[in-house]
Amino acid sequence: MDYEIITTQNIKDERGKLVVFLRGGDLPITEKQFGQIYFVTFKDKNIVRGNHYHKEWEEYFGIVNGRVKAVLEDINTKERVTIILDALDKDYLRLRIGVNIAHSFQSETDSACILNYTIKEWSPNDTFSYKLL
């Protein structure tokens, strides 16, 4: 299945933390053009977002606050994994999701927020519904 969990630089001190979410060198050489960055918020526990996949672009996700469960499924092989992203974890994890990997996120805290970078601008023409949660 085409996904990766990457531990990124997480600098903490008494003021808080600074997370290096994504650098240009982290992107494939073919994807150096800027895509799109957005935040996805969850206003309550057990809110589900996503339930879709893309055929043309990959995405990078990281938790900003709260805790979410990410469910991924390869639409061709049906292989499935569940990953927890928790803002309180010692290590900061970045989740890369490749093409044809359905993804859904469910909040496990009263509120949560995830950061998302797509290698291309969002388009309804490359968003295909796929129910996971």
Image (cartoon, grey):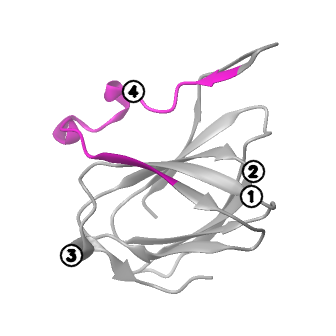
Residue annotated with mark 2: 66
User: Which x, y percent locates residue 6?
Assistant: 55, 39
Q: Which of these two is toward me, 128 or 37?
A: 37
Q: Amino acid at mark 4?
A: Arg
User: Which x, y percent locates residue 49?
Assistant: 56, 71
Question: Comparing marks 1 and 4, which lies closer to the viewer?
Answer: 1
In the displayed structure, 58 sits above or below 103; it is above
Q: Amino acid at mark 3?
A: Asn
Q: Are marks 1 and 4 in contact (CB under 8 Å)?
A: no
Distance of mark 1 from mark 4, alpha carbons?
27 Å
User: Which x, y percent locates residue 89?
Assistant: 78, 39
Question: Comparing marks 4 and 3, which lies closer to the viewer?
Answer: 3
> Upstream in the sequence, badge 3 or badge 2?
2
> Upstream in the sequence, badge 1 or badge 4?
4
Q: Are marks 1 and 2 in contact (CB under 8 Å)?
A: yes
Characterize the local packing of mark 4: few (<14), some (14-19) or many (20 or more) Cα atoms within 10 angstroms: few
Query: Which residue corresponds to the image point at 75% horizontal and 50% vertical from the top-left?
Result: 66
Instruction: State the mark number for residue 125.
Output: 3
The residue range painted magenta reads 17-39
Residue annotated with mark 4: 23
Q: Could you tell me which secondary element the residue under label 3 belongs to?
A: helix
Asked whether residue 18 is drawn in magenta, I would say: yes
Question: Comparing marks 1 and 3, which lies closer to the viewer?
Answer: 1
Q: In the picture, which quadrant includes the C terminus? A: bottom right
